[in-house]
Image (cartoon, coloured by chain):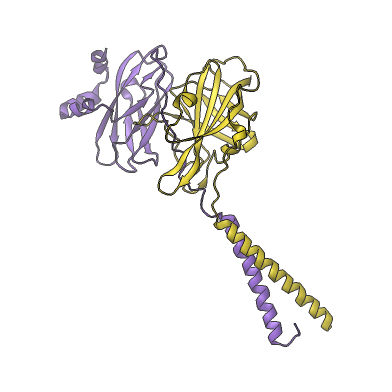
Amino acid sequence: MRGKKRRGNTAIAAVTVAALCAGAWLLHGAAGVHAPPQPSPAEARAGGSAGRAAPALPPSPPDRIRIPSIRVDAPLTGLGLTPAGSLDVPPAGEKNLAGWYEAGTTPGERGTAIVAGHVDNAEGPAVFYSLGALKRGAVIEVDRRDGGTAVFTVDAVEVYGVKDFPDEKVYGAAGRPELRVITCGGGYSRSTGYQGNVVVFAHLTGSRH
Amino acid sequence: MRRTARLLTGTALTVTAAAGVIAPAYAADTPELVLSPATAVPGTDVRVTTVACGDDGSATGDAGAVGAGRFTLAATGHGAEAAGRFRVPPSAQPGTYEIVATCADGGRELHGDLVVSLSPATSPQVRPRGSVKTGVGGALGPDPVQTAAGVAALAVAAAGGTWLLHRRARGDGI
C-alpha cells in the first residue's frame, strides 16, 4: 500500500518538474523576437539564370498567385504608385492579399511584371511572411484572367536596403517575361520599421491553359 | 482635345464651375485624385487614390463622365490614403474625362483627369521607384500559441506541486 503511494508521488513529482521546465522554456522562447525568414547568400543571383525561358504570353491581367513551396495561395489586387512614385501596397487589413503593378507588364507578357505583398500587419504574419525562405528553382504560378496559368521559376532571392534601392535591377525592363515578388525584410527597428525589401527574381518557364 | 472632352463631363463640371472652386484642382502639380493608369484603354480597370480626405477618410467617386458611374474610395490604412476603382466601359470613346470624388468627411470635392485611348499608352512605361512599405513588424511580437502553451504547462506544475505539498502535510511519506 505504502509502496504504491510512494510510486504515485514520484510520478507526480516527475510530471511537476517536467511541466515546470517545459513552461519556463516555452515562455522564454515565446518572448523572443520571431523575425520573418531572410534569404541566405546562397540564394543570391548567380551569373546566369537556371532553366530555359518559355515564349511570352499575350497580355492578360493576373487574378491569383501561388507559391506551393512556401504555401502561398492568394488573390491579386491592382496596385498603382504612391504620390512619391514608389509602388503602392495592398490594404494592410487583408492579410492574405497580394497586389500587382497594374500600369506595368502583366505576368507572362514580355517585360518585368511586379507583385508585392505584406510580410506582416498589425495582427501578425501576412501573405509573404515566408518569402525570404524561398529557394532558387522554386515555382511560382500566376493565374490569369484569360484562363491560363503562367509558371515562373525563381532565379534569385535578394535583400536590398531602403537606401540605395536598385530600381533598375528590380523594376527595369527585361527582354523576356520576368516576375519580381517583393515584400518587407532586412532588419527591423522599432522607430523606422523594416530596413529593406526581400525581392524574388523569377522568369517564365512554362504555361498551362 | 481637353476642351471638347470637358464638354462631355456634364453636370459635375457645371456644378463645380458654378461654385467657383475650379482653379485649385488644376493648380497643384500632384493632382488630388491620382488615377492609375492615367491613360486607359476601354474595358480596363482604373485605380483611384487620394490623400486629401484626411485620416481614415473615405470618399464617393463619380466616373459618370466616362460612363462608369459611382464608386467608393475606402481608407487603405496607409496614412490618409483612400483608394477605389472603376472600369472604363468597353464602349468609351477616346478623350479626356474628368473624374470627381467627394470626401465623406467635410464634403470636399476632388478632381482628376482620365485619358481614354484606343491603343495602350505609347509613352514609356512609368516604373515604380524605391522600396515598398509592406510590413509594420506585427509578426515580431511574442508568439501567442507558445505563450499559451507555456502558461498551461506552468499551471500543471503548480497543481502537481500543490498536491505533493498537501500529501506531505498529511504525513503521507514523501
- Looking at the picture, does residue A78 appear above or below residue A191? above
Of all residues shown, which one is farthest toward the bottom? B171
Q: Quadrant of the C terminus of chain A?
A: top right
Viewer-side residue, A160 vs A174: A160
**Is B15 on the left-hand or right-hand side of B100?**
left
Quadrant of res B1:
top left
Task: Give the yellow chain's letter.
Answer: A
Q: Quadrant of the N terminus of chain A?
A: bottom right
Q: Is residue B141 visible?
A: yes
- Looking at the picture, does residue A93 appear above or below residue A166? below
- Looking at the picture, does residue A24 appear above or below residue B105? below
At x 71%, y 87%, the residue is: B170
At x 29%, y 41%, the residue is: B54
Residue B91 in picture, x, y percent from top left: 40, 15
Color used for chain B? purple
Quadrant of res B126:
top left
Q: Is residue A209 visible?
A: no
Viewer-side residue, B46 vs A120: A120
Viewer-side residue, B98 vs A171: A171
